[in-house]
Each structure stands twice: as structure tokens, then as C-alpha cells.
Image: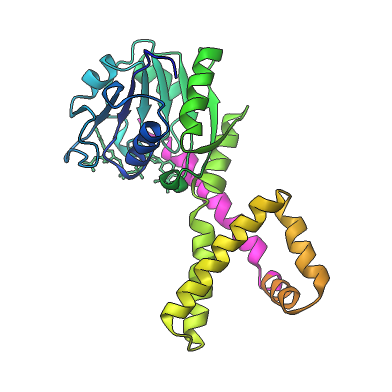
């Protein structure tokens, strides 16, 4: 990346902050000494060679790009003057205009990675404020590419929707897997066998979708057209409301995202 760039992660001791920091270092976006992490209670132990501080203003002063990764409820009390620097928020709900006013900068990116950042497989949609130029955009993309795939979107409401769809997304196949696991154990399958079967199915399904690189509905339709056991299962699950359950869940997540931005 640009030789002189320095990145700070506020909330760098948290779950997502640590995942982002690891990816940024692993993908050589910056060297250890050009990264700063802030923490509130416990210094992040897994970054022995990275400067860490409890003083968020100090982090902002020594960074060119400031990633804000605290919980939305903790953000109003985070008084950091970014004085015109590039601020990248990964917080659910907090809107561009709030970030710009609160951190005294017109260069703001609002992004939503997901838990798969931990394994470098996040999907990260993002939106930029008017003060963000092409250089800032390429910095943001380089950071997001360190932990997965990104897309810039046009409307901020898309970010609220995607906070549910992809931000929370890794939880949903896991939820499905847990339901399969419960059914398998209820049917008397040994736990170890059930776990290996279900986890392998989930991983294999992800790999299949990646390999085919087409709409999931096409994959589902190819199973339906086979007219065998899989089609019987899909039709029964649909009849019991699988699709409306998913739609209700995504709607609840999106509403929650908007409400998380209603902070004073
Ligand atoms: N987890 C996920 O999958 C995703 C999370 N997000 C967003 O990322 C953000 C972080 O989430 P996540 O990592 O899961 O949450 P965590 O609770 O794991 O991490 C938040 C961290 O922020 C720290 N913190 C709070 N206030 C301050 C402060 N003033 N100065 C320094 N550090 C502070 C906390 O410290 P302490 O523990 O000491 O209180 C904690 O380590 C949230 O806004 C969330 O909406 C977005 C997409 C996905
Ligand atoms: O559950 C949450 O609030 C966070 C934000 C998006 C995904 N996880």
C-alpha cells in the first residue's frame, strides 16, 4: 500500500477489531509499527509488536485512517477528533452524517463486514460520504480486500438492509446447520457423526456455490428437477414457511440496524 499510510483500529481488542487487524497485517496492508490498536480494558495480547493505547485521540493523531469498531452503544461517548482524516466505521446503524459530525471530518466510509472476516472470507458492502475521493476509495478497498470481498453501494438504506443479509449472514447457515444437527441427534445419530455430517455438508455447499458461481436459486432448481429425496425435502421446508421465516428474519435485522443508529 502507500508507503506512508498509518491505520488505527478503535476497539482493536474486540472480536471484529482483532479480525480486521490480523487481516490487515497478514495481507501486508501496513507494517506492524504503522498500525495502532486501542482498547478499553484489556490490551489485545495477540499483537505483541503493534502499538496499543487506551487513548483514542492519541490513536487518531498518529493514524491516517481510523477504523471505528466499538459497539454502537459505546460510540456516542467516544470523543475523537479525526480532524479531516479518513474514518471507516464498521459499526451497525451509525449513519454517515452522524460519523462526519461526531469525528469532525467529511471523509467517512460506512462499512459492514461480517464474522467471516476472521477467516478472510467477509462480504463487506460500504458507502462513502461526499468528501471521500478516489484515493480514499482505493485505500478503503485495499483494507476490505484484506479480509474478503467488497462492494460499494449507492444508498445508505442498502447498508441497513445488508447489515442483516450479509453482516449477520454467517449466522444463518449456522442456524440451519444447528437445526439439522438437532434433528440428527433427535433421530439417534451419535453426536460426532452428526457434527461431521452437518459441518461437511455446510462447507461443501459453500464450495459448490462458489464453484458454480450462479444464483442460488439455479442450484436449488437443479435439485428440484431431479425429483428425488432432495426435492421432497425442499418442498416440505418451503411448505412449512422457510422463505417467509428468512424474510421476517432479515427484516428484523434491518430494523434493528436502523434503531441502533438512533443514538444521541
Ligand atoms: N461481530 C460481527 O460479526 C460484526 C460486528 N460489526 C460491528 O463491529 C463493531 C464491533 O463489534 P464486535 O467486535 O463484535 O464487538 P466487541 O464487543 O467484541 O468489541 C468491541 C470492542 O470495543 C471496545 N471498546 C469499547 N469502547 C471503547 C473505547 N472507548 N476505546 C477503546 N475500545 C473500546 C471494547 O472493549 P471492552 O471489551 O474492554 O469493553 C471491545 O473490545 C460493532 O459496532 C458491530 O456492530 C459489524 C459487522 C459484523
Ligand atoms: O449482531 C450485530 O449487531 C453485529 C452487526 C452486524 C453483525 N453483527
Residue range in magenta is: 238-264
199 in relation to 262, above or below: below
In-image side of 52 versus 251 (left or right): left
In-image side of 213 versus 86 (left or right): right
Name the one closer to the observer, 115 or 200: 200
Q: Position of residue 255 (x, y in %)?
A: 52, 45
Q: Main secondary structure of the magenta part?
A: helix
Q: Position of residue 59 (x, y in %)?
A: 25, 21
In-image side of 170 versus 76 (left or right): right
Q: Position of residue 232 (x, y in %)?
A: 74, 78
Q: Position of residue 71 (x, y in %)?
A: 33, 39
Picture quarter with the N terminus: top left
Image point (41%, 36%), residue name: 91
Name the one closer to the observer, 105 or 15: 15
Image point (47%, 46%), residue name: 256
89 in relation to 236, above or below: above
Image point (28%, 18%), residue name: 60
Image point (77%, 56%), residue name: 218
Give the image quarter of residue 68. top left
Q: Is residue 198 visible?
A: yes
Is 18 in the magenta?
Answer: no
Name the one closer to the observer, 61 or 138: 138
Q: Is residue 96 visible?
A: no
Give the image quarter of residue 61. top left
Amino acid at each position: 500500500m502507500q508507503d506512508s499510510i498509518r491505520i488505527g483500529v478503535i476497539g482493536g481488542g474486540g472480536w471484529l477489531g482483532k479480525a480486521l487487524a490480523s487481516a490487515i497485517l497478514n495481507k501486508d496492508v501496513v507494517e506492524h509499527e504503522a498500525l495502532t490498536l486501542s482498547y478499553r480494558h484489556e490490551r489485545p495480547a495477540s499483537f505483541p509488536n503493534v502499538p496499543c493505547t487506551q487513548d483514542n485521540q492519541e490513536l487518531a493523531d498518529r493514524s491516517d485512517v481510523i477504523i471505528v469498531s466499538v459497539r454502537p452503544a459505546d460510540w456516542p461517548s467516544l470523543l475523537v477528533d479525526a480532524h479531516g482524516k479518513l474514518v471507516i466505521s464498521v459499526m451497525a446503524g451509525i449513519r454517515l452524517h452522524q460519523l462526519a459530525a461526531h469525528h469532525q471530518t467529511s471523509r467517512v466510509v460506512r462499512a459492514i463486514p461480517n464474522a467471516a472476516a476472521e477467516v478472510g472470507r467477509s462480504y463487506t458492502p460500504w458507502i462513502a460520504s461526499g468528501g471521500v475521493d478516489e484515493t480514499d476509495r482505493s485505500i478503503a478497498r485495499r483494507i476490505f480486500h484484506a479480509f474478503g470481498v467488497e462492494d460499494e453501494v449507492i444508498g445508505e438504506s442498502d447498508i441497513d438492509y445488508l447489515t442483516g443479509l450479509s453482516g449477520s449472514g454467517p449466522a444463518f447457515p449456522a442456524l440451519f446447520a444447528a437445526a439439522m444437527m438437532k434433528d440428527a441427534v433427535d433421530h439417534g445419530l451419535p453426536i460426532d457423526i452428526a457434527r461431521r455430517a452437518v459441518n461437511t455438508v455446510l462447507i461443501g455447499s459453500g464450495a459448490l456455490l462458489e464453484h458454480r458461481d450462479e444464483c442460488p436459486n439455479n442450484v436449488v432448481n437443479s435439485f428440484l428437477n431431479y425429483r428425488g429425496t432432495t426435492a421432497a425435502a425442499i418442498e416440505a421446508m418451503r411448505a412449512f414457511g422457510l422463505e417467509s421465516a428468512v424474510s421476517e428474519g432479515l427484516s428484523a435485522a434491518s430494523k434493528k440496524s436502523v434503531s441502533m443508529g438512533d443514538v444521541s
